[in-house]
Each structure stands twice: as structure tokens, then as C-alpha cells.
Amino acid sequence: MEFGDLVEFTQLGRSGLTVSRLVLGTDNFGTQTTEEDAFQIMDRAHELGINLIDTSDVYGWQFGEGLTEQIIGRWLSTGGGRRERMVLSTKLYGRMSAWPNDAGLSALHIRRACEASLRRLNTDHIDIYQMHHIDRSTPWEEIWEAMDILKTQGKIVYVGSSNHPGWHIAAGQEAAARRGHLGLVSEQTIYNLLERTAELEVLPACAHYGVGMMPWSPLDAGLLGGILRKERENRMGAPLPGAKVATHRGKRLIKLDRHRAAVQAFEDLCDELGASPADVAMAWLLGRPGVTAPIIGPRTLAQLDASTRAFEVNLDDKTLDRLDAIFPGPGPAPTPLSGTSAGDPAAAGRPPCPDIPGGP
């Protein structure tokens, strides 16, 4: 097998950066996946041709520790071309200590957070430095100035966003354009068959500004991964003993109860197709306009290997229509906009930065 035989490659937004069409997400490393298993997963991802690895300074969910970044840093330090061949992305925003400036997107925190991530990751630069959430208290001019300094210092190469509503993506890109700079090259947002709100404004904004889209939770925390069969067979995953992590299993089961009929219809359709629910859900996402690369979060090697099967699944128009019937999209964005923050999660009462697992 040659490098990249099992995955496809594309460019990230309008940038010249070539990335695999699957992103290795690492939210489980240190919580549900041991360091030894994480090393094996990263090695295997490298063999498969996955060249983009994504993490965050809050992953590992031990307050202020950056546990997952440390695991990745130790893997990168083993050599073998690992750092040179991988596109490394991490995120900042979450609170890293009780001190007031150790969270958010102030210029001070951006500088300190970047230095801390570089130390934990055992690297001299971050390829894509991403803002984990919006920060309404910090103007874009301050954010871009801080990011520009890091670029000039050679500590970051590109800038991306995560969990940003369409309006904030537009505002950020316009502010960058006024400075004559590239701006955002990527956005990470929740997007899958069950969660299609991104189709209202986030995906159109990314398409307009040439921002690559990396959807997180492509299987909606496992709800689209054959959960009903696993439930019947008692094959539900569990965190590592003693892990300090809110597994949000209760929330997942509440959501499953709300969508049980649709999930059952989906699993029945997958049985008809002779494909696993996870493969169908991933194939649907890979075929969506504007999607660059879904973020997968394997807990095991088997889950990682299984993720590449999505490239072999072809969904015809009839099947796509049936999927739309089971999981209807949100429809078109309201026109004209009313002046409210349509599509903004915070405007709907969702906190802008819940420092708990469940979103990259």
C-alpha cells in the first residue's frame, strides 16, 4: 500500500495547503484512549495518508494541563518524519487557569496560549492555529494583530476558527481583508445528518470567503454509528478508569430518545444498502458541498481503519432523498435577515464556550 492510497486529498479552502479528506481528531486521547493506543492510532493514521491532526489546549479535560497536546508532543518527538509530514492544528480559548487573562482571545492570552501549546507539542510552530469559540469581548482588530505577530515570529502558519456563526466568520474575514491579510482558512463546526443547522449560514459564509469546512462530530457522538445495535448488544464505550471527564452519556441518551424513530429508520436503510451506519453517515458528509474534511475521533485502531470505508460508499440520488426524508435539513436561511443573529448558537441560548467534552 502506498502512502495515501486509502484517503483522498484536497486543498484547505482557498489556501494552498493540501490536506487529507479525513482529519484525525484527538479529543479521546488521555480520556477514553490510553497514550500507548493513541500512539498506535497516530502511526496508523500516518500510514493511511491522513496528514492533518487536530487537537486543543483543553483536550484531556484536566484543568490547565493540556494533556492531549502533551501526548501528541511525545509522539511527534519520536521522529521518523512525523512532524515534517503532518499538518498540526490546535485551538485556544478555553480557560487554562483561574487567572482572568488565561482564557478568551485577548492578545495577551493568544500569545501565552501559543507559547504553552508549542511547549506541550514539542514543536517550533503550529500549522493551523484555531480560535475554539468566538470572544465577543475582544475586537477582531486585536485578534488579527496578535495572530499577525505570531506569524511574523514563525510560530503559526495559518489561522482557523471553530464554532463560529456565519456572521462572525464574515466579520473576521472583512477585518482581515482591511489589513490586506488572508484571514481564516478553516472553520470547525458541528455538522452531520442529525445536526444540519450549519447549512443556514455557516456553510454559505465559508463558501463565500473561501474558508475550508472541517465538520466535527460527524457521527453525532455515536448516534449515527449504529447505536441502536450497540445498545442491543451492550457494546457502549466507557472512559478510562479514573478519567476526569464528563462523558455526557446522559445527554446522548436523551437525544437518542428524541430521535429514536429517525435513527432506527436510518439504520434500517443502511441494512438495505449493505453498509454500516457510520460509513453511510461519513459518505453523506464527504459528499456535501463545501465540506473539506470531517474530523474523526477514533478511540481504537479498529475505528480508525473503519473510517476509510466511507470513500467506498456511493450514495445515489434516491438514497440521498431518503436520507433527507429521515433527517430533514433546516431549509434556506431567512431572507432578508431580520437583524438578529440567525444561526448564532449563542443567540439561541447556547453558552459560547462550555469547557466540557462534546465539541472540539
Image (cartoon, grey):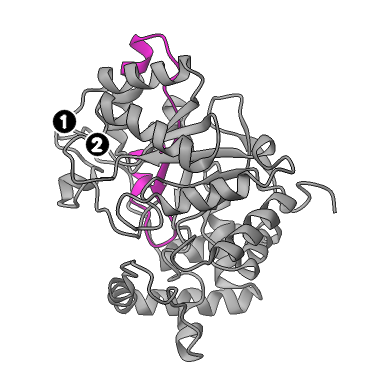
Q: Say whether residue 86 is left or right of residue 89.
A: right
Answer whether residue 272 is magenta in the image. no
- Is the residue 41 above or below the residue 148 in the image? below
The amino acid pointed to by label 1 is Ser
Q: Residue at x 51, y 90 (%)?
A: 233
Can you name the residue that lies furthest to the right here?
1
Whole-percent x, y for residue 234 in the image: 48, 89
Whether residue 131 is visible: yes
Q: Residues within 10 Å of mark 2 (few under 14, many from 20)?
A: many
Whole-percent x, y for residue 251 in the image: 28, 71
Which of the two residues, 319 or 357, is positioned nearer the viewer here? 357
- Is the residue 176 above or below the residue 93 in the image? above
Q: Which residue was labeled with disc 1?
A: 137
The secondary structure type at the circle numbered 1 is loop
Q: Which residues are magenta?
A: 174-203
Q: Residue at x 51, y 66 (%)?
A: 33
Label ID, residue 104: 2
Whether residue 319 is visible: no
Q: Say whether residue 242 is left or right of residue 227.
A: left
First-in-chain label (2 vs 1): 2
The secondary structure type at the circle numbered 2 is loop
| Contact (Cβ within 8 Å) of mark 2 with mark 1 | yes
- Is the residue 144 above or below the residue 291 in the image? above
Viewport quadrant of the N terminus: bottom right
Whole-percent x, y for residue 163 in the image: 33, 44
